[in-house]
Image (spheres, grey):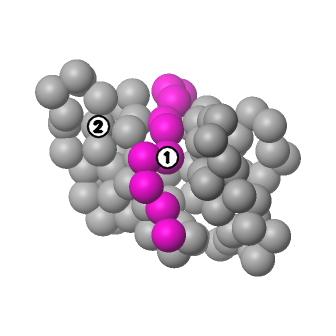
Amino acid sequence: MRLSLTRGGDAVVVTTDGAHATLSSSASSPPGSTVEGRAPSLEAVFALKVRGCKRQEDGRFAIQGRWVNLSREQRQLLLAAFSSPCD
């Protein structure tokens, strides 16, 4: 699932279990901050509380954290979109 970040840049959900996630992002974000992004195909804004951020070899950033303020419907949309074979 691709996200357009509200502070600029983009991110891709690499892994998620509905509570925690790892993103591959074009922008870094320090631990303790909140990354917000909007999926182009969905109306919802997704927020991730950052636990860690590390630069990858390709220049992007691996951001680990937990989803915050997700409604049940948003969580289901996230899991359905992530489990789909097409982004």
Question: What amino acid is at disc 2?
Answer: Phe
- What range is drawn magenta here? 6-17
1 vs 2, front mark: 1
Residue 39 percent across, percent down from the top left: 70, 40
Residue 67 rendering spot, x and y as whole percentages: 53, 67
Q: Which mark is residue 61?
A: 2
Residue 9 is one of the magenta-drawn residues = yes
Tell whether 4 sits left or right of 77.
left
Q: Is 72 located above or below residue 86 in the figure? A: below
The span from disc 1 to disc 2 (Cα, nearest Å) is 12 Å
- Classify mark 1: helix, strand or loop: strand
Along the line of sight, which residue is nearer the eye, 54 or 30?
54
Can you tell which mark lies on residue 13? 1
Q: 31 or 75, which lies in front? A: 75
Q: Is residue 77 shown to the viewer in this render?
A: yes
70 to 10, vertically: above or below? below
